[in-house]
Amino acid sequence: MRIAVSSDERTGVADAVVEALRERGHEPVPHGALADDERPDWAWAS
């Protein structure tokens, strides 16, 4: 299952959520600070 994941800050928690989704067989789709080509500010990430 593809699951959108967003954060306004790249933290250990955000990375752990993405990794946990991958371990469970899902395809995380990163947004905000988790994506290199997107704006990281909180309003955009939300």
Image (spheres, rainbow, N blue to C red):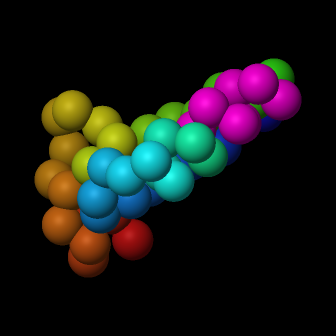
Between residue 3 and residue 21, name the one nearer to us: 21
Q: Mark yes or no: residue 45 visible.
A: yes
Name the residue located 39 percent from the left edge and 71 percent from the top edge: 46
Q: Which residue is depicted at the point 21% across and 32% down? A: 36
Residue 1 as seen in the image, left or right of residue 30: right
* Residue that appears at 20% across and 44% down: 38
Instruction: Specify the quadrant of the image occupied by residue 42.
Output: bottom left
Kindly identify the residue that appears in the image at 71 percent across and 36 percent down. 21
Horizontal side of residue 35 vs 7, given as left or right:
left
Q: Magenta stretch: give its range.
A: 18-24
Whether residue 16 is in magenta: the answer is no
Residue 20 in the image, given as x and y percentages of width and height: 71, 36
Q: Main secondary structure of the magenta part?
A: helix
Give the number of marks: 0
> Residue 41: x, y in percent?
18, 66
Q: Is residue 41 above or below residue 15?
A: below
**Image: 28 above or below 10:** above
Most distant residue in the front direction: 12
The x, y position of residue 39, in whole percent, is 16, 53
Residue 2 visible? The answer is no
Give the percent coordinates (x, y) of residue 17: 61, 46
Q: Quadrant of residue 9 in the image?
A: bottom left
From this viewpoint, which residue is outermost toward the right?
24
Quadrant placement of the N terminus: top right
Q: Quadrant of residue 27?
A: top right
